[in-house]
Image (spheres, grey):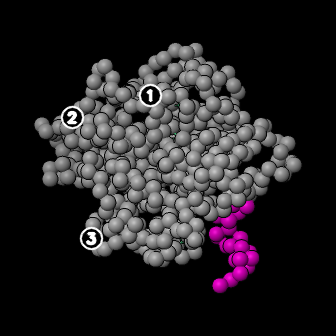
Amino acid sequence: MPEPLTRRGLLQGSAAAAAAIPVLGDAQAAAPARPQRQKEQAQMSAVGLTVNGREVHLQLDPRTTLLDALREHLHLTGTKKGCDHGQCGACTVIVEGRRINSCLTLAVMHEGDHVTTIEGLGTPEKLHPMQRAFITHDGYQCGYCTPGQICSAVAVLEEIEAGIPSHATEDLDRVAFSEGEVRERMSGNICRCAAYPNIVAAIREVAGHGTAEDKA
Amino acid sequence: MRPFTYSRAASVEDAARTAASTQGARFIAGGTNLLDLMKLQIETPTHLIDVNHLGLDRIEPTAEGGLRIGALVRNTDLAADKAVRRDYAVLSRALLAGASGQLRNKATTGGNLLQRTRCPYFYDTRMPCNKRKPGSGCGALKGMSRSLAILGTSDACIAQHPSDMAVALRLLDAQVDTVGADGGRRSIPIADFHLLPGETPHIENALKPGELITSVTLPKPLGGTHVYRKVRDRTSYAFALVSVAAVFEKDGRARFAFGGIGAKPWRTDAADAAAPSGAAAVAEAALSGARPTAHNAFKQQLTARTLASLYRQKGA
Ligand SMILES: Cc1cc2nc3c(=O)[nH]c(=O)nc-3n(C[C@H](O)[C@H](O)[C@H](O)COP(=O)(O)OP(=O)(O)OC[C@H]3O[C@@H](n4cnc5c(N)ncnc54)[C@H](O)[C@@H]3O)c2cc1C
Ligand code: SF4
Ligand code: FES
Ligand code: FES
């Protein structure tokens, strides 16, 4: 496997640079210590959040997305930035019990909110069942989309449990687990490595549908 | 993103007043369209007014037997609402066909109505676009227009309206309820809410400066069989090439609204009147006056075929 540095250099020279550069650019925009940035900042806002059970207080440029607050300010880098435009789902976190794209929301809009990231679901010593199932079923290759996939998957099972219908639901009043439901509900999480079949298998297992039944 | 200041509105009146009196102010609801466009500097507000905490997130029956949907009700909650599922299933279906689970958890009723076009030239700030920069020309007219509109367009702009939800609201004859900068309230019929581009494609709706959408009101239920059929490049998480919302009655009457093909959510009396004559007649009536480009002419046939498929499904 190439070393990380070589890999980064490689990425920037290729078509994938389009995805890599914004990550660096926005990291700078969000860094609080940049003097020339600070000058053009119109206002800093105080934000209090509970992230993975821990209360945190931040002074942020209002432009800071929840994603940048998590990654650049709280150094919770499990949550990933793929597109920064709501198109890939890599940034999915759970806020007040609901999965959202953290790249398309401002941190200042979440005063007092409870946020759960991949780091809050489980730890290497004490994995969340969904994390364990992703490992068992090889639900990833490069792993970049995985934190978003797992946060989404945990919320998807809760949504089905709560009877929230989806585009795949035939009778809006009868929401039930099926593979078709999982595929539709997980469509907001893109996997460049196309680990989809294994992701579905992992979710089936956690839902208690590990065998071949319920195929839709 | 350009720098901006941020505040939370204290009341709907305060929100509208502040928006009208503050240069460069915009409301922010779910933020899923506005922030996307701000990152690209297509939208450059200097002040954001957060309207998420004004109690506009309720769904309640009206005295007339309809339903009042708060402007801040999330797309997920609206689609899952019991009364909506039962009486306005076409609205549930349209919502669920749009965006992703994550986005629907944030996207609001008001924000969805006001989402801006997905024309690729509108998004590319290096290209001319009359909607983004009035008078700069239209990059799409002679460019890649596959996804764009064939109805209601002008020589200045051929952008499609991207919303699924708005197509269902158009079908249901919803009203858009607002409060203005002077505190005055009014209701705008959905048919008059979105504007055709004409010479001024940057003016997209009937709202006045500072005017805040407080709710969307549905008239009493229509009955009938509700369907929403969306055709897109992927099975999920993609905008419509063509979509059809319909309510079929037992006696052969029906009403239709169309997405993906119009500069605004599209509905015509002639298409509704043609319902008893079948899918081909409806398609012909709906598409009358179409101005397709070489790239999007296929949308005419796709509309006709989508209608044919709905008629077959209804008969089954
Ligand atoms: C990747 C992706 C895929 C998508 N796919 C689809 C799809 O398939 N179908 C579809 O229909 N949509 C789709 N969407 C669009 C999505 O539905 C909209 O972004 C969303 O509905 C906007 O709602 P919001 O509350 O987030 O609006 P915001 O971004 O908060 O606001 C949008 C605009 O409305 C104004 N506004 C908001 N609320 C009010 C109010 N109460 N009164 C007055 N003005 C107001 C804001 O000032 C802003 O100009 C997609 C979006 C993304 C990012
Ligand atoms: S079609 Fe409209 S939105 Fe697209 S480039 Fe032309 S003017 Fe702009
Ligand atoms: S980074 Fe948020 S959806 Fe891609
Ligand atoms: S595992 Fe590589 S993008 Fe999903």
Q: CA distance from mark 3 to mark 2?
A: 36 Å
**Residue bearing mark 3:** A213
Mark 2 or mark 1: which comes first in sequence? 1
Q: Quadrant of residue B263?
A: top left
Q: Residue at x 65, y 23 (%)?
A: B18
Secondary structure category for the residue under label 3: loop
Q: Name the residue nearer the viewer: B305 or A76.
A: A76
* Left or right relative to B159: residue A156: left
**Residue bearing mark 1:** B215
**Residue bearing mark 2:** B223
Residue type, label 1: Ser
Residue type, label 2: Gly
Overall secondary structure of the magenta section: helix
Q: Residue at x 54, y 76 (%)?
A: A141
Q: CA distance from mark 1 to mark 3?
A: 44 Å
Q: Is residue B15 visible?
A: yes
Residue B85 image position (x, y, % from top left): 29, 41
What are the residue bounds of the magenta stretch? Answer: A1-24
Secondary structure category for the residue under label 1: strand
* Closer to viewer: mark 3 or mark 2: 3
Residue type, label 3: Glu
Q: CA distance from mark 2 to mark 1?
A: 23 Å
Q: Is residue B74 above or below residue A99?
A: above
Q: Is residue B190 visible?
A: no
Q: Are marks 1 and 3 in contact (CB under 8 Å)?
A: no
Residue A71 image position (x, y, % from top left): 68, 57
Residue B252 image position (x, y, % from top left): 15, 39
At label 2, counting other C-alpha atoms closer than 10 Å, the crowd grade (few under 14, some 14-19, many 20 or more) is some
